[in-house]
């Protein structure tokens, strides 16, 4: 076994052109060239085997890490709120502080009436009252806040068109619409 290792080592020395100095022995050279003495396999072979083993047998945590978006930090909440105002408009005519001044901390969805909170940005979206595709501008006066489901359903319709469409859907489903009396 030692003779096989010696032959492979001597072939490596002849290939690389290295010479052996007086205090350097063959065992040092074998370590330098990453060979194991017993099975004559390179050390990277053992690393590859280890990676395959860890891939097939992954370590599992006893307690899973919390999902980051379920408990966002205050910094992440602030960034999300300010990003909403920036993505609503190309040129910055207003920022999230102006929106907070207009709507406050708690406000209803403009279409569904669901209660929304300013500090929970995943619960609401900004919407153009007059859609941008129909000549609406990116001003604060053309802004309304909707829940995400209502905003996605509304799409590029005006509020009145969307309400008419909802009425058609309700009537087609066999329901009657009663408008409450103002008391």
Image (cartoon, rainbow, N blue to C red):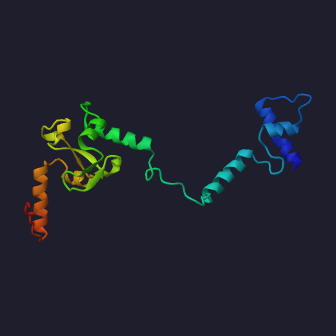
Would you say 20 lies left or right of 41 here? right
Q: Nearer the viewer, residue 178 or 56?
A: 178
Residue occupying the point 17% across, 47% down: 156
Q: Residue most toward the bottom?
A: 174
Q: Examine the rendered structure and indicate whether residue 62 appears above or below residue 88.
A: below
Residue occupying the point 31% across, 41% down: 84
Horizontal and vertical percent for residue 126? 25, 44
Q: Examine the rendered structure and indicate whether residue 86 appears above or below residue 129.
A: above
Would you say 23 lies left or right of 135 here? right
Would you say 40 lies left or right of 89 here? right
Q: Nearer the viewer, residue 115 or 112?
A: 115
The quarter of the picture where residue 99 lies is top left
The quarter of the picture where residue 75 lies is top left
Q: Residue most toward the front?
A: 183
Horizontal and vertical percent for residue 105? 30, 46
Q: Residue most toward the right?
A: 22
Q: Nearer the viewer, residue 180 or 159?
A: 180
Would you say 115 lies left or right of 80 here? left
């Amino acid at each position: 076994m030692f003779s096989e290792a010696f032959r492979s080592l001597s072939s490596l020395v002849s290939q690389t052109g290295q010479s052996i100095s007086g205090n350097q022995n063959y065992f040092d050279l074998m370590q330098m060239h990453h060979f194991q003495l017993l099975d004559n396999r390179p050390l990277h072979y053992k690393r590859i085997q280890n990676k395959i083993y860890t891939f097939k047998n992954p370590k599992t945590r006893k307690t899973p890490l919390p999902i980051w978006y379920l408990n966002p930090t205050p910094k992440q909440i602030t960034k999300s709120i300010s990003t909403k105002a920036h993505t609503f408009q190309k040129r910055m005519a207003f920022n999230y502080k102006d929106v907070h001044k207009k709507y406050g901390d708690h406000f209803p969805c403009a279409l569904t009436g669901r209660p929304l909170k300013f500090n929970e940005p995943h619960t609401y979206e900004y919407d153009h009252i007059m859609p941008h595709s129909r000549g609406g501008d990116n001003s604060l006066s053309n802004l309304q806040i909707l829940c995400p489901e209502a905003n996605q359903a509304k799409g590029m319709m005006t509020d009145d068109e969307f309400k008419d469409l909802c009425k058609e859907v309700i009537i087609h489903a066999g329901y009657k619409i009663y408008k409450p009396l103002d008391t």
